[in-house]
């Protein structure tokens, strides 16, 4: 009888946990067909996932940082733009994961070797998630990257 009660409580716990997981937002999943470099466990406050497109400069980097606030992350980007006289093509708030996130797009690098960078900064509890997509200057935005971002943001 005690064994049956234990199994029943274990089943209820598993069912309850499954419901909670279903309600939580999805983790970031990189674009299909891209090479994935899983996070290295070197920093307890920061995990970094990276995907690369074979034979191309394109990459997607996802950083989960529990030591930097959303406000500080956006302020650091804005300060970098000001200090280095970068004029972003986009610098705006947007909705992601049910909250206000910040999106910037800009080009950097020497003439003939520039890359386009899109960075999405999303508050996550006391920390911040950052999705950075880097591609050759002027190249088309990869639809699989867009799908990964849309799935992550939930919109």
Image (cartoon, rainbow, N blue to C red):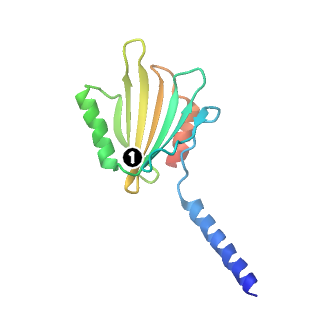
The quadrant of the rendering that contains the N terminus is bottom right
Q: Residue at x 30, y 48 (%)?
A: 71
Q: Is residue 14 above or below residue 28?
A: below
The secondary structure type at the circle numbered 1 is strand
Q: Which residue is mark 1?
A: 101
Relative to 125, 36 lies left or right: right
Q: Quadrant of residue 33?
A: top right
Query: Which residue of the protein is positioned furthest toward the front in this rendering?
Result: 42
Q: Is residue 11 above or below residue 119?
A: below
Q: Residue at x 37, y 56 (%)?
A: 126
- Residue 57: % across, % down: 51, 22
Q: Residue at x 25, y 25 (%)?
A: 85
Q: Residue at x 39, y 52 (%)?
A: 127
Query: Which residue of the protein is positioned furthest toward the top in this rendering?
Result: 112
**Near-viewer residue (38 or 120):** 38
Relative to 111, 6 lies left or right: right
Query: Which residue of the protein is positioned furthest toward the bottom in this rendering?
Result: 1
- Residue 144: % across, % down: 58, 34
């Amino acid at each position: 009888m005690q064994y049956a009660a234990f199994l029943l409580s274990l089943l209820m716990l598993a069912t309850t946990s499954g419901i909670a997981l279903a309600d939580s937002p999805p983790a970031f999943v990189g674009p299909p067909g891209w090479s994935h470099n899983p996070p290295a466990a070197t920093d307890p406050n920061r995990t970094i996932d990276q995907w690369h497109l074979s034979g191309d400069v394109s990459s997607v980097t996802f950083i989960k940082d529990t030591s930097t606030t959303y406000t500080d992350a956006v302020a650091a980007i804005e300060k970098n733009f000001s200090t280095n006289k970068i004029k972003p093509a986009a610098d705006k708030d947007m909705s992601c994961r049910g909250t206000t996130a910040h999106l910037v797009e800009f080009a950097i690098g020497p003439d003939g070797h520039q890359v386009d960078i899109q960075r999405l900064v999303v508050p996550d509890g006391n920390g911040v998630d950052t999705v950075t997509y880097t591609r050759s200057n002027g190249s088309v935005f990869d639809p699989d990257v867009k799908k990964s971002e849309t799935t992550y943001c939930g919109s």
